[in-house]
Amino acid sequence: MVEKTWTRISDKYDEYITRYPDEGLLGGKLPLRDSILSGKGNYYEAIEGKLERECLIGYDSETSPIENLPSEIRMKLPIKLTQTLQVQVTSDNRHYWKTTYDTVDNAHNSHGFLRNGQWYAIRNLFHLSLCHYETINRPSHHRQSDYVQKVFRNTSTIAAYVSYPILEGYLKYRCRHVIERDGTVTQSNEIKKVRRGGYYEQGNRCSSLLDILVYFEENIANSNLEENLEQMREKIANFGNVGTDEAYGLIYGWRNSNLHGEAESDVQYGIVLNLLCLLIWEELIRNDMV
């Protein structure tokens, strides 16, 4: 049953991407992917019509709601949802992030999952990612001041800035036997300098998200997670017309552009959040917390 459900979901999302250039409401080929490639900084969310009703989980009467799907599907789901982010932030993305937030919050409160400071940071990224949609769909008589509204309407930009250090902090937590929270390496010849060659020595400072991502996948991830991360890299690579092996380098480049104020607002935060969700769900399942 799990395999049948996953195949249906996967096929539906593939169909969405295939049909969108000819049938999508926004026009163009794949709007958000094209925006990232061109650097235009466009952002599209929940513009849904006939095609979305035929392809998204939220409209599919034959598929359980996201919160009721088996845990192993919810772990893999961000891979396919990242594929749909080439078009826009769909209602399925929002629903998935809300389900993941609720699950992690419950695991944190019930089992002490994640450190308090770490969950506080990750939780804020979820808040930013979810509040934009709720704000723009709120009745006008419930709306706040113009200043507050402008913040809410730009949460995708704010989320992009905070998503990278939050991902980096979580990875350091998972790799804590070789690197401290401030980036100090505690064991020599473990973390590779992917672009510069060689390895970090004990006492060196590692501030490269690329190097930490590569170390995590090659040394921390089990075979199942490693396979899922490879599939995720394949989806991420589509946003930069690069090879699968260069996907983490793409994230690294986006992070640096944001750090220096060069990036435009787009859906980077959603890609990073989906990657983070994949890692968190794997940890939840491995620790029997779902």
Image (cartoon, rainbow, N blue to C red):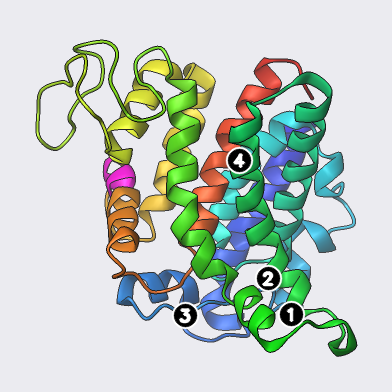
Q: From the viewer's perspective, is 38 left or right of 101?
A: left
Q: Give the alpha-carbon distance from disc 2 to disc 3, as whole Å.
A: 15 Å
> Mark 3 touching mark 4, by CB under 8 A?
no
Q: Which residue is mark 1?
A: 136
Q: Give the alpha-carbon distance from disc 3 to disc 4, as whole Å.
A: 24 Å
User: Could you tell me residue 152's position as x and y percent?
Assistant: 65, 74
Q: Residue at x 63, y 57 (%)?
A: 13
Q: Which callout, 2 or 3, points at the residue further toward the start of the chain?
A: 3
Q: Is residue 86 visible?
A: no
Q: Which residues are magenta?
A: 245-249
Q: Residue at x 21, y 14 (%)?
A: 202
* Amino acid type of the residue tagged 1 in the rendering: Ile
Judge depth for marks 1 and 4 and give the one in front. Answer: 1
Secondary element under disc 1, as helix, strand or loop, is helix
Q: Which callout, 4 or 2, points at the residue further toward the start of the chain?
A: 2
Q: Which residue is mark 2?
A: 132
* Amino acid type of the residue tagged 2 in the rendering: His
Front position in the image: 125 or 96: 125
Q: Is residue 96 magenta?
A: no
Q: Give the alpha-carbon distance from disc 2 to disc 1, as whole Å.
A: 6 Å
Q: Which callout, 1 or 4, points at the residue further toward the start of the chain?
A: 1
Q: Tag on residue 267?
A: none
